[in-house]
Amino acid sequence: MRNSLKLTPMQDLEFENKRVLLRLDINSPIDSKTKKIVNDNRIQKSIPTLNYLIDQNSKIAIIAHQGDTLDYHNLIPLKEHAEKLTKLLNRNVKYIDDVCGPGARDAIKNLKNGELIILGNVRYLCEEISTFEDTVKLTPKEMLNTYIVRNLAPLFDVYVNDAFAAAHRNAPSIVAFQELLPAAAGDLLFKEMETLTKIKNKPAKPSVFVLGGAKISDAFSMMKQVLENGSADKILTSGITGEIFLLAKGISIGEKKMKFIKDRSLDLFIEPAKEYLNDYSDKIEIPVDLAFEKDGKREEIEINTLPVNEMFMDIGNNTIDNYRKIINGAKTIFVNGPAGVYENKIFENGTKEIWETVATAEGYSVIGGGDTVTAAEKYIDLENINYVCTAGGAMVRFLSGKKLALIAAMEKAYNKRKDFK
């Protein structure tokens, strides 16, 4: 499949004695109190590409981000990231708290073969934050005059991108350097693309998508694509997504939960859910019972006895049993989003049981999304999942059939190199 992707593999370029600008996505979950990294999955997955570039005797400067305006509490320096990479690579990874100012440029110029440095958090620059991207809307060519590109591009021979998790971002560090430098994709970028392309286009059948969580825009975005192109044989709904489908089926879930849904404008998804039920009723599974809290204990209620004025926080045991059978019979399993509010011990059962089933099922399993991976890690060994995608937003957009900004930039660089040859 790699040959069908219009991306230049880094193995096709020369790196000996070259200065390499490497864009990684090592944005990691941060403990709100200690400001320390609590999950280094993305950092670990960057190691094969880094080892390859080290073996090629190149001089490596890493640019990456941590946090954003939308999650300012995670906007911290990359010093701990450098420390973790130092341990994983068993070689010193320098850190400088400067993205592209005089200090960073001098450090880059002084790199020797086989040396690595992480530059400062690119999100400290206004041109790299999401609010800038959403408001200013520059093209890659217009980004050539941004501060980061003007200051860094002249110092490098090659640009390598291994940041699929940020592939949906139209930011200079993601899409602009390809305009000026020979550009190649790292191994992780290829693996993510290959796996998700297989899930989207040619999954082994039957293929089951397990969609939950609170961010139902992601679920509905994916659902449309995989139902229309036939990728999904079954969609198992839970969380708010499952409740929206109950409402679409004409089942009242009570005033309290309905207010919760309306207050967040999630009732906008009821009409699309009706269309999906009308067109793909045999492919969409909805909960048959729900769980709520009463006097500090878990209670479950059958759908046919609704409505009751409760806040439902999990799927019930009968739904879990139904979903377990379907998952065990699947040859491809894709999961995005927990089944319930698993952070609360009373409501962890649905999420726990689903994950344990996926981990032991014989089908090829793929999971992705920050909260999805965090939930999975709580209950299972991720080694029992066939592929753990580093991406959240990029994964959802890719499976929704949308063109990712990074992939468009890398394909343009690929075609330019092909034409030059």
Image (cartoon, helix red, strand yellow):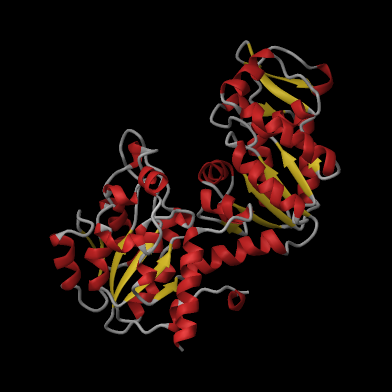
Quarter holding residue 96: bottom left
Q: How many marks?
A: 0
Q: Nearer the viewer, residue 83 or 212?
A: 212
Eyeballing the image, is 381 above or below 191?
above
> Which residue ends up furthest to the bottom in the rendered image?
421
Asked if residue 345 shows in the view, the reply is: yes
Horizontal and vertical percent position of residue 131: 37, 42
Percent of width and height locating residue 358: 68, 49
Report whether residue 92 is seen: no
Above or below 57: residue 145: above
Q: Position of residue 308 (x, y in %)?
A: 73, 13
Please give the name of the residue rendered at 57% of the width and 44% of the height, measured from the top-left corner.
Answer: 376
Q: Is residue 141 left or right of residue 6?
A: left
Left-right relation of 73 to 402: left
Classify residue 240 as left or right of residue 54.
Answer: right
Farthest residue, direction right: 282
Q: Is residue 100 above or below residue 298?
A: below
Q: Quadrant of residue 210?
A: top right
Task: Give the quarter of the figure containing the N terminus.
Answer: bottom right
Residue 301 in the image: x percent, y percent? 76, 20
> In the image, what residue occupies the spot 72% across and 36% down?
272
